[in-house]
Image: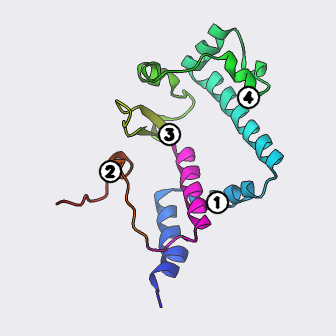
Amino acid sequence: MDWYAPIARHLTVPLAARLEGKRYLGRMPEVRAVEQLSPQGLLDYQWELLRELIHHAYENTPFYRARFAEAGITPEAIRSADELKLLPPLGKDEIRAHVGEMTARNLPETDLVADATGGTTGLPMRFYRNWRCLSYRAALTEVFDGWYGKRIGDRMALVWGARQDYPTFARLKS
């Protein structure tokens, strides 16, 4: 009998998450609840989250406040996904040049975690995530892994090409 998985699932992982201040295990019921929504319920939920994000960006980032002003609109003017076209698209160079202005001013600096894309299509794109984002991402990963039968504590091998995603793992050397 494999004793590792139940110990990890019920003791080690929850304890480590608590000690590290990670809240992803508590977010998993919310993520699972979204799976149960009807197609229209999911669209409504997505729209609600998008509207919150639009308002947050407008209220808390100089870049997006200016972007809305240049377009002559406010977040209230965006009442459907089609109206997002009122804002000009962003290019990678513009994001690189203004990442500081795109960082929300209402988040403490200690809540921000630097991240980057892999740079497979050119230079890596640097940006920040907060701990709330990271906890939802971890919860989503656990729920998605459950779709193919993996549960917390199950052993698995991971082959991944983006080194920046796992900077503390030892690298295999030839």
Describe the element under mark 3 as helix, strand or loop. Answer: strand
* Residue at numbered disc 2: 167
Residue situated furthest left in the rendering: 174
**Is residue 113 found left or right of 68 in the rendered image?**
left
Q: Which picture quadrant has residue 75?
A: top right
Give, as a single range, the part of the protein colored magenta: 129-155
Q: Earlier in the sequence, mark 1 or mark 4?
A: 1
Q: Main secondary structure of the magenta part?
A: helix
Q: Which residue is mark 4?
A: 81
Which mark's residue is nearer the viewer, 4 or 2? Answer: 4
The structure residue drawn at horizontal position 70% and vertical position 56%, both measured from the top left corner, is: 30
Which circle's residue, 2 or 1, is located before the other in the chain?
1
* Residue indicated by mark 1: 28
Q: Whole-Å distance between the Cαs marked 1 and 3?
A: 19 Å
**Residue 12 x %, y %:** 47, 73
- Where does the image place residue 158, in percent across and percent down from the top left? 40, 62
For the residues bearing labels 2 and 3, Cβ distance under 8 angstroms: no
Q: Which mark is residue 129?
A: 3
The amino acid marked with disc number 1 is: Met
